[in-house]
Amino acid sequence: QGIMSESKETKPETQTGSTSALPATDSHIQLYSKFYTQACLIPKDVKEAPEEMKKRDQRILITLETITKLIFGSDGKKKARVVLYAGGALELIVALVKRSGVLNVKNIDNNGSDQAEMSKKIILSALKSIKTCVLRNPAGRARCRSSGALGMISNVFELCMMEQHATIVEEAFTTLAAMSLGDDLNALEASTEMKPFIKASKEVFPNASQMHQKTLYLDTLFAAIEKEQASFIKYLKSDNSMAAFFKNIIEAEKNKMTALHHVEDKKFSAALQHFNHSIKLVAPFLDKTKLLDDIVMDIRSNRASANSEVGNSKMCLEDTNILLNVDGIDKRELLKIHGKALIDLGRIEEGKETLAKLRIMSPDDNEV
């Protein structure tokens, strides 16, 4: 199947509030919730008897295949909710692969025929489940960095390229394309790290025409992002900041997720510390590229909400004033906390004017 085989993508609206662990409000999410709990119980210890390890690996394989079945074909919002549930679907996939140890060997085929086949099945199933999580799902693609999914793809290439496992390598390229399409940050990171594997694939698999179609697509995608971000890439290289940039992005995203967990627990002061640190991590790059705009808007939106909860009206307005001037985002929740902050600061008329705008947009909202 091609990477564009699922239904039309629906980009979730930017919103305030937590998105890290969404409530089980329908049967599909309830089913996934129970499945996720069971998946997390798969033992981590790899120092087991061979028969126990075989059972564990079989359970890992079934779990990976089930993730694909549960998510494939879902609409954008439902898929986003599943991928973001609890610790995250991508994080679960990466953890299961680590528990299996399949990427820790020097040569898959040296493990005996049965174990070698199981290892290949686990790697292929992991790639397919990652692809299903990110296809037509911006929320899933945004988790590729912090979840370690991009790093896992690199490990797959390193292990399977020279062993000439063509099916796995081709699936890895397909999954990488799905990660990169529609997420310029993923595309930029992939363009800086994955090109050697594309070059090697042409030498190792000279007659793999379908694989080369995928690598040609990736080459085209990488060339486009490199052209668009030429001045930023030049800056990162001149300052030797390329690795620091991606490291900071990952740390910023992890801090944001930690903050959202604190929001769920009503620990708003702790959440604000992590939101603030997230902004601090990306701040050195904000005047150099627009690639971080979506990340920063999401952090600001959630930070404004947290500041509103603890009565930091002035700090709340610093974020809402910026966000209300951004096109293409849902501003109803922003207007609500913006108006409240204005009134709390004694700017009554401005607050009433803001809430009047909200009343027009949401006439049925009883809180307005």
Image (cartoon, rainbow, N blue to C red):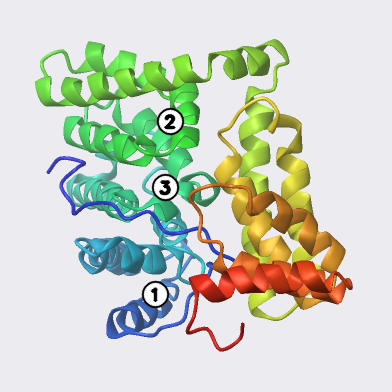
- Per the image, the residue denoted by label 1 is 36
Element class at badge 1:
helix
- Amino acid carrying mark 2 in the image: Ala
Camera-side mark, 2 or 1? 2
Return the mark for residue 141: 3
Marks 2 & 1, CB-CB < 8 Å contact:
no
Tell me if residue 76 can be seen: yes
| Amino acid at pointer 1 | Tyr
The 10 Å Cα crowd at callout 2, few under 14, some 14 to 19, many 20 or more, is many
Horizontal and vertical percent for residue 285? 70, 30
Quadrant position of residue 182: top left
Q: Residue furthest bottom?
A: 366
| Residue occupying the point 72% across, 50% down | 278
Q: Quadrant of the N terminus?
A: top left
Q: Nearer the viewer, residue 322 or 356?
A: 356
Question: Count the marks: how many?
Answer: 3
Residue 255 point in image, percent of width and height: 68, 56
Q: Label 2, secondary structure: give it.
A: helix
Q: Which residue is mark 2?
A: 187
Disc 2 to disc 3: CB gap under 8 Å: no
Tag 3–tag 1 contact (CB < 8 Å):
no
- Percent x, y of residue 279: 74, 47
In the rendered image, the vertical position of residue 218 relative to residue 21, given as above or below: above
314 vs 169, nearest the viewer? 314
Q: Nearer the viewer, mark 3 or mark 1?
A: 3
- Say which of 315 and 144 sits in front: 315
Disc nearer the start of the sequence (3/1): 1
